[in-house]
Structure formats: C-alpha cells, structure tokens
Image (cartoon, rainbow, N blue to C red):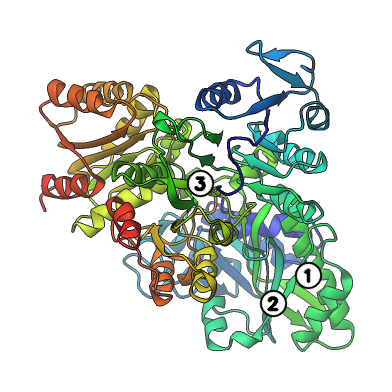
Amino acid sequence: MAILVDPATKVLIQGITGTFGACHTRLSLEYGTNIVAGVTPGKGGQFFDNRIPIFDSVADAVRETGATASCIFVPRANAADAVLEAAEAGLQLAVCITEGIPIHEMLVVKRQLSRHQMKLVGPNCPGIVTPGPEPDSRGGCRIGIAPGYIHRQGHIGVVSRSGTLTYEAVWQITRRGAGQSTCVGIGGDPVCGLSLLDVVRLFNEDPDTHGIVIIGEIGGSAEQETAEWIQNSCRKPVAAFVAGTTAPSGRRLGHAGAIANSTHETAAAKIAAFRDCKIPVADSPSAIADTILKLL
Amino acid sequence: MDLHEYQAKQLLAARGVAVPAGDVAESPDRARTIAERLLESGVRRFVVKAQIHAGGRALGSFAGHPNKAGITFCCTPEEVEHAASEMLGKTLVTDQTRPEGKRVLKVLVEAAIPVEREFYAAVALDRTKDCPVLLASATGGVSIENAVSASPNRLVKEWIDPFLGLRQFQARRVAAALGLVGGSILTAADFFHSIYRTWWECDALIVEINPFVQNTGHATQHSIIALDARITIDDNALFKHPELESLRDASEEEPIETEARKHGLDYIKLDGNIACLVNGAGLAMATMDAIKQCGGTPANFLDVGGGASQEQVAAAFKTIITDTNVRAILVNIFGGITDCAIVARGVAAAINQSGARLPVVVRIEGNNATHGRAMLVEGLSRVIVAHSIEEAAKMAVQAAGG
C-alpha cells in the first residue's frame, strides 16, 4: 500500500518526445514504473524507444492502454491545456512537472477540475515516488523527476512544496535506515492541485504510512490549515520543516508561490503554527529525518 | 513584476477607471510643462508624486532632506517645477524601501483632487480559495494592513468565480457594504468591474487602488476617481504580454539581479556577507536559514536550477562575487540525477576562472558524491568540504570571520 500510485499504476507521459520528457521517461522505466503510453499530438502511431506506443491524444491512449495516471512534461504555453485534456479523458491522477504556468490559467484549470474526479499534483513540482522493494528502491512507481535511488521502501510519508529540499529530507531518512511509503512534491506555485493538507489526509488513511514529514515554505497559509487539521484529526506522528526564515518580505524566492506579503505568510508564523499544534519542527534542514524518526 | 503608479493608472484608465488628469515627467522642465497644460484646462492645484516601486511615499523622506516627502502639493507650475527638481535624481527612503532608499527618476504630475472620503479597493489572488477576491474598505488612504488589523470587520470581501467574472450584483453588494447609497452604488459597481477587468486582462497578481475617492460635489455626479494605484503582474504570464514586459523598469532592480536573470538564474541580493550557491529554491532558502542559525548572514538567495549544469554554476559564481560585501562562499548542491563529479568539476572550473580569493565551503551530496568531494579536495586549496548543511553553514560563518 502507498498513496496515489503503486507499481501497478498504468502511467502515460504527455510530452514524451521532448528532451526533458524523454530523459525522465527512460529513468522512470529503469526504476520500474509501469509506463504504458506516450502522448505527443502529431506523432500518434510512432513508438518511443521502440517500445512505448505514442498517441495523438490522451483519450486515445486511455482507450488503447487503460492508463489511469499521467505525467505532464508539456511546455508551459500548453501545459494548462494538457491538464484539462487529462481530466477530460477520465484519468485518476495527473502530475504536472512544468514550471512557469501563468497563475490565471491555473485558476481556470482548478475551477474546471472541480467538475472531474481527477487529482492533480503540481504544477512546478518534482512529482511522486512510491519506492519499490529492490536495490535503489527500484520496482516502485516514479512519476516525475525525483532521483529514484535516494528512496527506500518504508513507512514515512513525505509531502513538500520544494524539489531538492525534498530529496535532502528523503536521502536523510534513507541513510538512517528508514524508508518512505510515498513521497509527494506538491509544487511551488501559489495555485496548485493537491494541497499539503490533501496529501496529509491521504497519508493519515494509508495503513502503510506510520509517520508524516511536511516540508513547507514562505507564502500562503497552507501550513497553518494543515497544522490545525493535524492537531484535531491526525492519528499519526508528524514532523515539519519550514524554509525561508531569512527570506526578505515581499520578495519572491524562486518558487512563484514563495513570497511573504504579510506576517502570517512568513516562515516564523508557520513554524509557530506547527508548534502551537504540538507538531515538532526541525531547527535545521539537516535535522529533518531525526525529527520524525524520534517520534516513531 | 511591479509597475509604477503612472503605468498602473494608464492600464486602469484604458479600462474605464477615472484617474486625475496628468502625465509623467523625467525633468523639472517637463513637470512644469505638464502643470501649465493642466492649468490651461482649469486645474488650480497640483500634486507631484515620486515614482518608485514602494509605498509609504507621503510619509517618506529624501536622503539629506528629512522634511521633503515623496508627494508634494503645489499651487503653480513654478512650484511644480521646484518640487520635481527636489525629487528627481534624489534618494527617497520610506518604510517600504530598503534603508538605503530608492533613486527617483520619474515624477507623476497630476491635478490634485479635493478629497471628501477615501476608500480602498483591490483585486487579489486568494490562495486559500484558489480564486480572485475583491477587497474593499471605507477606510482608504492609510496602509491597508494597519486598517485591517485595527478593524478587521470593515474589510469587505467578495470572492469571484473565474468562469463568471465579477458580476454586477456582487459589485453592487460591495458598494452598498461600503456605505454608498443611491446612484453611487452603480458608479462604484462599474468602477470595481473595471478593476477586475484590469486584473484579469493584465494577468495581474494584485491591482490595488488606495485610495479612491467619491466626489459628490464634482461636475459629474457621483464620480469615483482612483488617486493611487499599484499593480503587480504575474512574471509567468509576461510571455503572453510583450506590451507589459516593455513596462519593466530596470533601474528599479539591483543591477546584479538583472544580470543574473539574463543567465536564467534566480538571484536576490541580501545584506549579509556569505554568498550562497544552491540548486533548488527550497534548498536555497533552507541554506540561508542555516547560515543565520549559525550566527552569520546570507549575502544572497541564488537558485542555479535543479540540474546545476557547468554553465549555470559558472554564471552563478560570476554573479555572487560581484557583491563586494561577500567574505565567504557556500556552495550547497544536492545532485539528484546529475552526477556530483560533473557538478564538482563545474564548481572547480568556476572557482579557477573567477580568480576570487574568497574561501569556498562546498557541501555536495547525492549521486556519486564521494567522488565529487574527492575531486574538490584534491584540486583546490581554498575549498573546504563539509558533510551536512549545518556543518557547511558553521564553516562558512567561521570563514567569513564570525
């Protein structure tokens, strides 16, 4: 068990023939991900690396292969469209890696997704990994761009708004001999699919997840909402880290959503919210793994 | 991307928002000409407003002239010329600028509008509800954060469905909640609608009017005029709006930041003396935090991108050492997919090319990290290799002189 994806999940790749999409498709195949189709409009009928059939539309790919999840590597001008196409084709899950989608377009996408069952992770995210049992955690499901080998099959759920900082936390957990149930990077944009809280709720229901790590950052108030819910409803130990204590106010730090315009959007306010809700917060990025492992 | 007040007003005026008559000037001469033209059209009182990307101008002051504010009222074109000459080329410090202030290169010369009542209105992104929200208050003119913390119930909120836009009944509801009555409700509703249209059409993150005034005694009944305006455009959407990209004012940015952007680097200058070079925005923030926690101060935020290619690392190195405050450099790379040996080679080459004599602390982790670290230790005497972020931060603080 894990959340969102497992080794049996049939995955299709939107934008499979682009350089970035192709590179990560190969890495995911090596990892053991069950990639059944690619979608590149205009290239239907061809094969990716002589093995993965390419379709002109997501609907065609779903009909022919039974794919239920998509990974989107489509360039930003067409990425919002790609998400809507995935939803319309009846997929269960889309993971959008693309960075730089205009926020207004995401508002429209988000509104439209309320009419569909599909869950969206991202955009501007590293994706999802459910580690497998083999060496370097192969035999699992990797959707996105995270390095597979840093993972290890285990029982800690990781959810994060960041990319490399997530890898940092995952690698720390792995090196201490523990492992992860599923790792979800929800992305650094102000308007995104699943929220920190959505993912924490999934972990809470997953019997295979025994503890949860949350990696937050400046901007918005997702950490506060999550902290409050955990205090009232979460049955599992949770540890947190929040990046951006030294961030200057009103400046955007890399991620489109990483900007503190008011005091409640600062790292200090979020750390205080977690601590008020009795959730331990790692003082240093080097201490993320130890903070959760102490609770298990 | 932030816009100047005069640019924001142009975008709003093009969508039906009434703004005071006026124009922007880069010289005192030009400011006087604008005032003379306004005088001809019957204007008897003028206002000269410094154009910088920061609020608090009325209460700010110019470096060396504590009594001169960034907004001055005048009665003649001569006074306007004088006021402009006291602003242009000078440095304005407000509670929203950095302590060293901002140089004023443009002033907005406008007809001064008699104020009966000041209101606040904005359309912003509600990140909790994932939709735009119209915010309005009957206490305009002051900092909205102060106004809200003083009386939170007086901020009116109307959430907008992006599929439907701001509907007339919603706009009227907001106008009524502000205490407006009769025909003013309809005028205000049109006004709110124009603000929303500007927000939507310009891919804005925020359009803020603080204050707008209602002038019942004016020739046109129930007129509503935007006295000040602030717009921030979504950087991600600029590729769709070349006309908005051309409104970018490079003089408002740190030259290092402009240069860094050309190389595709996310760089923000800070006040400390430990330069950071990190791959990934979250890790970069966490690295800055670690430096602070070890008693140091970061000189910058810098994300070289997840992959940290050799070219990016070289460009990043050049960027961070142009800051003369820097006393030590901390490189923190998590090589996920990228081979750390390749990153190490890039770091070594960048150090050698840069010729900088600064101590460099490198923490490199991930794919083939052992090999990468070994390469750095063997190749360069000025490089100190750390094994955790915390250790790297401590070493960098020490290397920078405590």
Q: Give how far across and how far down residue B390 sits, in percent.
A: 22, 50
Instruction: Report whether B290 appears left or right of A253.
Output: left
Q: Give how far across and how far down residue B75 sits, in percent.
A: 60, 75
Could one spot residue A284 in this view of the protein? yes
Q: Amino acid at mark 2?
A: Ala
Secondary-structure class at tag 1: helix
Could one spot residue B217 in this view of the protein? no
Extreme residue in the top direction:
A50
The Cα atoms of the two marked residues, 2 and 3, are separated by 43 Å
Label 1 marks a residue whose chain is B
Q: Amino acid at mark 1?
A: Phe
Q: Give how far across and how far down residue B98 sits, in percent.
A: 37, 61
- In percent of the image, x 76 and y 39: which residue is there? A86
Q: Quadrant of residue B163?
A: bottom right
Give whichever of B178, B387 is nearer the camera: B387
Disc 3: which residue: A182
Image quadrant occupied by the C terminus of chain A: bottom left
- In percent of the image, x 59 and y 21: which residue is there? A22
Q: Amino acid at mark 3?
A: Thr
- In percent of the image, x 54 and y 26: which residue is there? A24
Query: Image height check: is A38 above or below A9?
Result: above
Instruction: Report whether B276 appears left or right of B142.
Output: left
Instruction: Report whether A20 appears left or right of B123.
Output: left
Disc 2: which residue: B136
Respond whether the residues carrying marks 1 and 2 are from the same subunit: yes
Give whichever of B338, B383 is nearer the camera: B338
Secondary-structure class at tag 2: strand
Query: Image height check: is B10 above or below B223?
Result: above
Label 2 marks a residue whose chain is B
Q: Mark 1–mark 2 contact, CB under 8 Å?
A: yes
Disc 1: which residue: B192
